Image: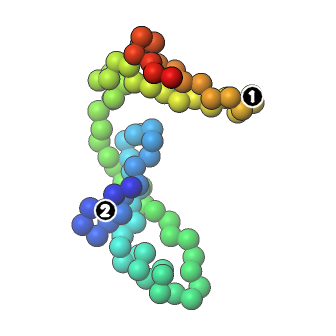
Amino acid sequence: MDWYNDNLFFFPENQGGFLFMITKSEIQNNLQKDDQKPIVARQTKFSTPDYSKLIPALMVLKQTVSQMKMYILALNQSTMIL
């Protein structure tokens, strides 16, 4: 999450070509109301390179929900740090 001008941006972990944005005025207006409702962030386009091709030892975290265990996968196991 980061501010750019008067916009608060949220960066999704998967870098799927988009990010989310809420304006500062939306936040301020909502805080001044007695009946506050959730603010819905707008999805905006965000062009990023394919980091899995640029970083050979890109770590991917995967959770197996059925067994509730965490696994760490890497493209190059010699660079994996546990």
Residue at 40% in and 40% down: 15
Which element carries disc 1, helix, strand or loop?
A: loop
Residue, far left = 5
Q: Position of residue 31 (x, y in %)?
A: 48, 81
The answer to whether residue 42 shows anywhere in this view is yes
78 or 11, nearer to the observer = 78
- Name the residue that disc number 2 marks: 3
Residue at 46% in and 62% down: 41
Residue at 28% in and 70% down: 6
**Tag 1: Cα neighbours inside 10 Å, few (<14), some, or many (≥20)?**
few
Compared with residue 61, is residue 20 higher up or lower down, i.e. above or below? below
Q: Position of residue 25 (x, y in %)?
A: 36, 78
- Name the residue that disc number 1 marks: 67
Residue at 24% in and 66% down: 5
Compared with residue 62, is residue 75 higher up or lower down, i.e. above or below? above
The reply, left or right, for residue 44 in relation to residue 33 is: left
**Tag 2: Cα neighbours inside 10 Å, few (<14), some, or many (≥20)?**
few
Residue type (three-letter) at the residue carrying disc 2:
Trp
30 or 78, nearer to the observer = 78
Q: Position of residue 78 (x, y in %)?
A: 42, 11
Residue type (three-letter) at the residue carrying disc 1:
Gln
The answer to whether residue 75 shows anywhere in this view is no
Quadrant in which residue 58 is drawn:
top left
The reply, left or right, for residue 35 in relation to residue 54 is: right
Which element carries disc 2, helix, strand or loop?
A: strand
Q: CA distance from mark 2 to mark 1?
A: 38 Å
Q: Earlier in the sequence, mark 2 or mark 1?
A: 2
Quadrant in which residue 62 is drawn:
top right
